[in-house]
Amino acid sequence: MNRWHYLTTPPFKARYVLAAHWLRHLPVIVEVGGWKNCVAEFLPSGSPAVVYAVDPLLAIPEFPAVVQFKKELKDIQLPQLPKPYGVVALGFDVEEGPNFETLVGLAEEADTIVLESALRYPPSADGVEMLIARLDRSLHLTLKMDMTGSPLELPPDSSRPFLERQMYVLK
């Protein structure tokens, strides 16, 4: 079993439904770190959005209007993004360094930013807090999600630190 298999289960895919709600009005979305999930799958039918999906481990099917980058964020060249645009990073796990600074630059210019992290996994939770602190934005939503009661198949070595989540929407 893949160590991240739980991210493809219905409780974890529900995070994308919430993110898509906040991003559905935007013509362009930059998604960082989707792995086997993509926010495009959860946008309303007929959505005009173009999604730039960035993840070196990206493993999503082809979607119309999704441009896939199977690279680190720091290693891609996005086109000039029209405004307004959105940034989404669910399962945030970006350490300080070039990827983080590139994300800060994208988020500073974005209309809407949706971030989500595992509360009991410090690289994720601390990274989100560090990013929020760098942005001059209003916090529109903080949502805690507890999936500990969900019937998930987790790898045997998992200590379940990833089941308590927190989502942030900034404008």
Image (cartoon, helix red, strand yellow):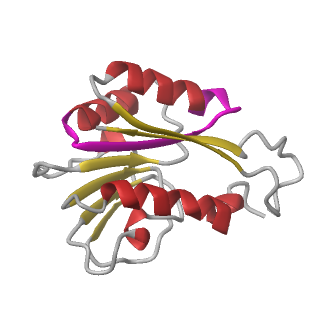
The quarter of the rendered structure image containing the N terminus is bottom right
Residue 160, compared with residue 56, is above or below; it is above
Camera-nearest residue between 143 and 39:
143
Q: Position of residue 38 (x, y in %)?
A: 44, 64
* Magenta-colored stretch includes residue 98: no
Is residue 57 found left or right of 5 in the rendered image?
left
User: Does the image show residue 126?
Assistant: yes
Q: Position of residue 105 (x, y in %)?
A: 24, 31
- The quarter holding residue 10 reads bottom right
Camera-nearest residue between 75 and 129:
129
Which residue is found at the position 14% from the left and 52% from the top?
Answer: 79
Is residue 147 found left or right of 46 in the rendered image?
right
* Magenta-colored stretch includes residue 116: yes
Q: Position of residue 131 (x, y in %)?
A: 41, 26
Farthest right residue? 156
The quarter of the rendered structure image containing the C terminus is top left
Q: Position of residue 12 (x, y in %)?
A: 62, 59
Total residue callouts:
0
Which residue is found at the position 39% from the left and 61% from the top?
Answer: 20
Which residue is found at the position 23% from the left and 65% from the top?
Answer: 50
Q: Which range is magenta? A: 109-124
